[in-house]
Image: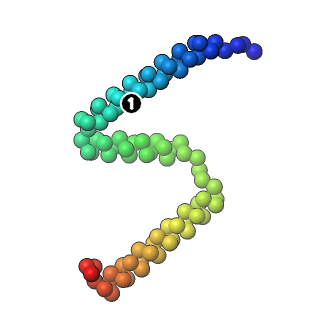
């Protein structure tokens, strides 16, 4: 097996770190000039990408998610019933 050149690795790592810092600064500077709509579209694009590459959850996670949604829906129905009974502003 070939021995890794540690000095070369350190230099490459430092260069990559500087590059990432530069890219981060550039993104922050460009973000100042985005309209809210452009920022939202970038966020949605990122979310769509992450949803494509995210691993599927286990069956257990899916069942827990369904239970959470059912509990949330039940709570919303209770709140709406309470609001109908007591009025929206108390």
Q: Residues within 10 Å of mark 1 (few under 14, many from 20)?
A: few
Is 20 on the left-hand or right-hand side of 38?
right
**Residue 16, position as x, y percentages in the image:** 49, 22
Is 64 on the left-hand or right-hand side of 39?
right
Quarter of the image for residue 22 reads: top left
Quarter of the image for residue 31 reads: top left
In the picture, the quarter occupied by the C terminus is: bottom left
Residue drawn at (70%, 13%) of the image:
3
- What is the basis of the colouring in this image? rainbow
Whether residue 14 is situated above or below residue 73 in the rendered picture = above
Question: Of all residues shown, which one is farthest toward the right?
Answer: 1
Report the front residue among 69 and 79: 79
Residue drawn at (43%, 22%) of the image:
19
Question: Of all residues shown, which one is farthest toward the bottom?
Answer: 85
- Which element type, helix, strand or loop, lies under badge 1? helix
* Total labels drawn: 1
Q: Residue at label 1?
A: 24
Residue drawn at (28%, 41%) of the image:
38
Whether residue 76 is situated above or below residue 13 in the rendered picture = below
**Residue 33, position as x, y percentages in the image:** 24, 35
**Residue 89, position as x, y percentages in the image:** 25, 79
In the picture, the quarter occupied by the N terminus is: top right
Residue drawn at (38%, 30%) of the image:
24
**Residue 67, position as x, y percentages in the image:** 55, 68
Is 43 on the left-hand or right-hand side of 13?
left
Report the front residue among 70 and 13: 13
Quarter of the image for residue 4 reads: top right
């Amino acid at each position: 097996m070939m021995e890794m050149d540690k000095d070369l690795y350190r230099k490459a790592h430092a260069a990559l770190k500087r590059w990432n810092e530069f890219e981060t600064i550039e993104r922050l500077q460009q973000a100042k000039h985005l309209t809210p709509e452009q920022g939202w579209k970038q966020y949605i694009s990122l979310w769509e990408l992450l949803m494509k590459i995210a691993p599927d959850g286990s069956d257990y996670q899916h069942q827990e998610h369904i239970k959470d949604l059912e509990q949330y829906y039940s709570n919303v129905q209770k709140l709406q019933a309470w609001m109908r009974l007591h009025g929206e502003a108390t």
